[in-house]
Image (tube, coloured by chain):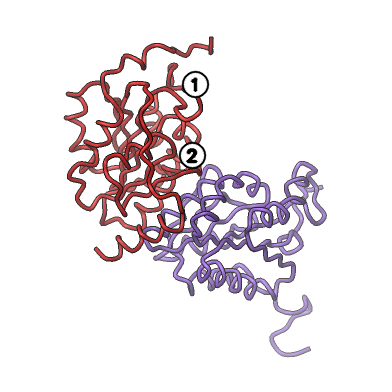
Chain colours: A red, B purple
Amino acid sequence: MTGNLDAARAEGYPLRRREVVAALLAERGDLLVVAGLGAPVWDTTAAGDHPLNFPLWGAMGGAAAMGLGLAMARPDRRVLVITGDGEMLMGLGALSTIGAQRPENLSIVVCDNERYGETGMQLTHTAGTIDLPTIAVAAGFAGADTIRSDNEFKAALPIIREAPGPLFHSIKVRAEDLPFAMPPKDGVTLKDRFRDALQQR
Amino acid sequence: MQEGQTDAGPKQIDWPGEIFSVLRDWQVRQVAYVPDAGHSRLIEMCDGDGEMRLVPLTTEEEGIAVLAGAWLGDQRGVLLMQSSGVGNCINMLSLARVCRFPLLILVTMRGQWGEFNPWQVPMGQLTPKVLADADCLVFPVDEPDRVGETAAAAARMAFEGPTQAAVLLSQSLIGVKSFGR
């Protein structure tokens, strides 16, 4: 037993992470994407490797802060951070740093399966009572919500893509093992192709 | 005694102002920091600059990720911290190293030169070693008249490399904090 964490509930969540991320990135336009390590990297890559994705193979806890720096540098472009609950929990302070800057073009999505998926599906704190969107609102985000159903997700999609931010959405997804879909691993390649693609457009 | 000098000795060197000039020269746009008393004048100058954006952090490692994002968006930045913050950065430094992001860090040293607080000493003593182990170029400076050129040298190597470079501003520059004792 792990404190007050619930080991069973995320196995029954109706939303599936790979479909959620594919929908987030369908018709992405000129969206800039930072993906936190683990499942969000595999899921964004499964939706189609893209030079304007920056997948993090490490730097756990850094995805939201990286999205912040990018959003401040390019206020003319929408920045979407797609990360996991374990990665977000390691960098919760970044939510207050984002709240202090309030970039309108930044949207953070946590695909929350309540698990450390890469290390044996151990429970994260989100399997308990912690409510990440409430923390984001308290930190000064313009909006935040928890998404639990397909209808809620469809309604949230245009908000995630276009509404004034900073925005935070926790999408509760089923705890499940899925095949890997790996992007390039070389950090210099990922950085250079992102910068080249961004400067060409 | 020449005209313009006083009994107080030669003119004080405005080393925070010289660092600020270096940041201006390199068009630094994001100034990420966890504050230190030794950085307070520099932070004020950056705050007064219409083109620099101050990004206060909750922990120093956030700054490494923020400035990596900034560089993806083609902006340069700088990360300010005191030596105790270096220990908070170790894993995140792998982001700068593996991807070769430019990373200019300005560290005000504690626990190094007449330190009053023994709790500052371990990280102060470890700072140059762990930065070097993390593949970060290290530029210690303890004379006020060399701060400007040292910051310029580090900035050039960080931004032109691109690589990670840290300027360690000696506690002897900043003055020893004694809590009135």
Residue B3 horizontal side relative to residue A188, left or right: right
Q: Which residue is mark 1?
A: A122
Crowding at mark 1 (Cα within 10 Å: few <14, some 14-19, many 20+) = few
Compare residues A167 and B11 and report the one nearer the observer: A167
Instruction: Give coordinates of residue B47: x percent, y percent.
Output: 47, 60
Instruction: Give coordinates of residue A108: x percent, y percent.
Output: 34, 39
Compare residues B69 and B100 and report the one nearer the observer: B100
Q: CA distance from mark 1 to mark 2?
A: 17 Å
Vertical arrangement, residue A35 with respect to residue A187, above or below: above
Residue occupying the far front of the picture:
A179
Instruction: Give coordinates of residue B74: x percent, y percent.
Output: 38, 63
Q: Which residue is mark 2?
A: A61
Residue under the image location 28 percent in, 35 percent down: A21
Say which of marks 1 and 2 sits in front. 1
Mark sitting earlier along the chain (1/2): 2
Amino acid at circle 1:
Gln
Instruction: Give coordinates of residue A129: x percent, y percent.
Output: 43, 17
Amino acid at circle 2:
Gly
Numbered circles on residues, count: 2
